[in-house]
Image (spheres, grey):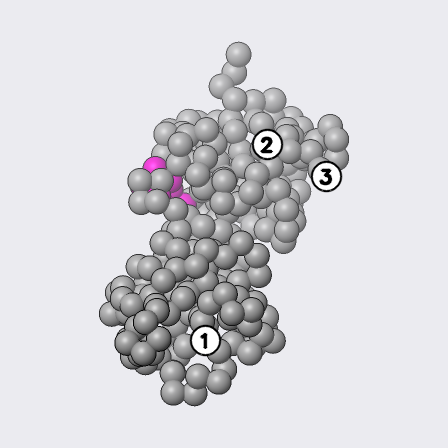
Amino acid sequence: MKNIINIGIPSKGRLRRDILKIFKKNKLNLVSERGERDLLGSIKNLSNAKILYLHAREIVERLGDGSLDLGFSGYDLLKESEINTQNKINVVKKYGFGKATLVVAIPDPWIDVQTVADLEEIAFEFKDKKKKRLRVATKYPNLTREFLFSKGVTQFKLVSSLGATEAYPFTGSSEIVTDITSTGETLRANNLRVLKDGEILKSEACMMISKSAQRSIAIKKIVKLLSKN
């Protein structure tokens, strides 16, 4: 039995489409028995490779625990994962597509708030006058907490976002948000604007490898093939 190489590809969205193009370009033909909806696949001419179509966040987790050898995901999701997961993963290539930025966005009417420092004042006002904490809706609790603390903002409460984060202030579920955006259009459409110094992290699509697999010659070959773009 050859050592099987487990490769994780995002199961949906633009990231999936862009990654599949790289395989195609490098003459690696992906085969799935049941077509596009299949969660498993293989590579024609590479009998020792197995493709698993997973959620982009799960790819990072599974690279961390070694159940995937190679995977494709966003840099943002790697950086959001726990430190001990990050320590077990190497980024071998950044692709330059799937670019987006994680930002802090606030409601347009808050004209006095331009920077993260202004946000701290609002947060204390909330605490003193309204006896509650400023709520921040996000799908990135670790990066958000780290960023706000590093800027001296401490009086806030994270609200876990399950859907369209930009709608949270509009529905009264939070006051502000941190969200990943490529153009800022969705935020603007929801009457939110990005703070002047509110950039938390720049992200793009990456090829990542589990450190437990990096010595494998077979994996090095695949990495080399997929590094041309």
Mark 3, other Cα within 10 Å: few <14 / some 14–19 / many ≥20 = few
Residue 51 is tagged as 2
Q: Amino acid at mark 3?
A: Glu
Name the mark nearer the viewer: 1 or 3.
1
Q: Which residue is mark 3?
A: 36
* Whether label 2 touches label 1, CB < 8 Å: no
- Between the C-alphas of marks 2 and 1, the distance is 40 Å
Q: Amino acid at mark 1?
A: Ile
Q: Position of residue 177 (x, y in %)?
A: 46, 67
- Between the C-alphas of marks 1 and 3, the distance is 39 Å
* Whether label 1 touches label 3, CB < 8 Å: no
The residue lying toward the viewer, choosing from 45 and 80, is: 80
Magenta stretch in the rendered image: 86-91
Q: Is residue 14 magenta?
A: no
Mark 2, other Cα within 10 Å: few <14 / some 14–19 / many ≥20 = many
Q: Amino acid at mark 2?
A: Ile
Q: SS of the residue at dot 3?
A: helix
Q: Position of residue 131 (x, y in %)?
A: 32, 71
Q: Position of residue 35 (x, y in %)?
A: 75, 35
Q: Earlier in the sequence, mark 1 or mark 3?
A: 3
- Quarter of the figure with residue 120: bottom left
Residue under the image location 34 percent in, 37 percent down: 88
Name the mark nearer the viewer: 2 or 1.
1
The residue lying toward the viewer, choosing from 65 and 127, is: 127
Q: Which residue is mark 1?
A: 106
Residue 45 is tagged as none
Q: Position of residue 93 (x, y in %)?
A: 45, 48
Residue under the image location 59 percent in, 70 percent down: 186
